[in-house]
Amino acid sequence: MLWHASSLLLLNQFDIIRGFAVDYVHCILLGISRSLAGLWFDSEHHDESYYLGRQSLVVDERLMTIRPPGCISRAPRSIKLRSYWKASEWHDWLHTYSVMCIHSLIESLYFKHYLLLVCSIDILNGTSISMHDVNIAREMLLSFVCEFASMYGQHNMSYNLHQLLHVADTVQNWGPLWTTCAFPFESGNGLLKKLFNGNQGLPLQVSRKFLIFRNLPILAHKFIPQDRNDVRKFF
């Protein structure tokens, strides 16, 4: 097998090791968090000691009775509908709902292990993080990854799990996880998807409508009176 060096190595002042950040959305929310929920609730794991499928009604009852604050845009949905959850819902599950929903239902060993993930990611996703905080989170994630195989099986060790070992470095080099996550880009993709119809000439459709939307504020400022007293005259 031939290996080719990345062209990014040719970029001046770019560190190909530290120049990439672990994405919080796909690695942790849509990766680790969703995978763990699958291990807990998918019926194929019914013989495992960590299986929570038989307690799914209790989990749902706890989840659906939560009335989240206004900063959470989506109301909780049933754990049975998790295959339809958006990344923001997995964010709310990891940081807000999951601990109280599975408490006393899963064995203490697994619960304490899960807390390593929740607490470390909560630290690294904060608004003000010291190096001491980063190091604490790094040790938690190391313990979480090292203990994972003995608790959930080596066959469930994934690339996303390996990436957890680099999450603290991402925060140390680039700042809190929310500053480098894919949420803004996913939102931008959602906007771009609305800028075309059908399947012909997509680049031209997107670029043309994007330019129109981009210039709307300029046109509005030019043609719509800014003085309220002139609005009647305009219409």
Image (cartoon, rainbow, N blue to C red):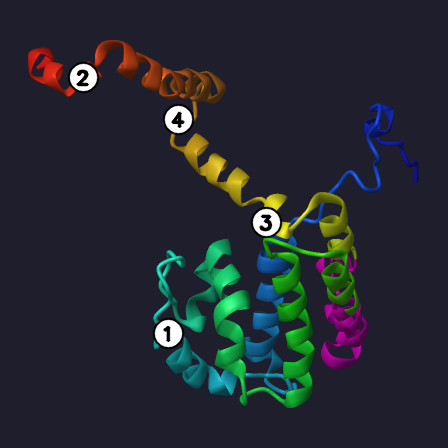
Residue, x 44% and y 22% (percent of image)? 206
Mark in front: 4 vs 1: 1
Q: What residue would you read off at disc 3?
A: 178
Please name the residue shown 71% across and 58% down the image: 160
| Residue 15 in the image, given as x and y percentages of width and height | 84, 35
Circle 4 residue: 196
Mark-to-mark CA distance, 4 and 2: 35 Å
For disc 3, the neighbor class at 10 Å (few under 14, some 14 to 19, many from 20) is: some
| Mark 2 crowdedness (10 Å alpha carbons): few <14, some 14-19, many ≥20 | few
In the rendered image, the vertical position of residue 174 relative to residue 201, given as above or below: below
Most frequent secondary structure within the magenta stretch:
helix
Compute the Cα span from label 4 to label 1.
39 Å
Q: What range of the chain is rendered magenta?
A: 140-165
Where does label 1 land, which residue? 66
What type is the residue that disc 2 sits on? Answer: Asp
Characterize the local packing of mark 1: few (<14), some (14-19) or many (20 or more) Cα atoms within 10 angstroms: few
Q: Which residue is mark 2?
A: 227
Relative to the observer, which residue lies in front, 168 or 43?
168
- Looking at numbered disc 1 in the image, what kind of residue is underneath it? Ile
Q: Secondary structure at mark 1?
A: loop
Q: Magenta span has 232?
A: no
Query: What is the distance, in whole Å, between disc 1 and disc 3 at their CAs?
Result: 24 Å
Q: Is residue 4 above or below residue 34?
A: above
Point out residue 134 in the picture as x, y percentages from the top left corner.
Answer: 74, 59
SS type, badge 4:
loop
**Distance between the Cα atoms at labels 3 and 2?**
40 Å
- Residue occupying the point 78% across, 38% down: 19
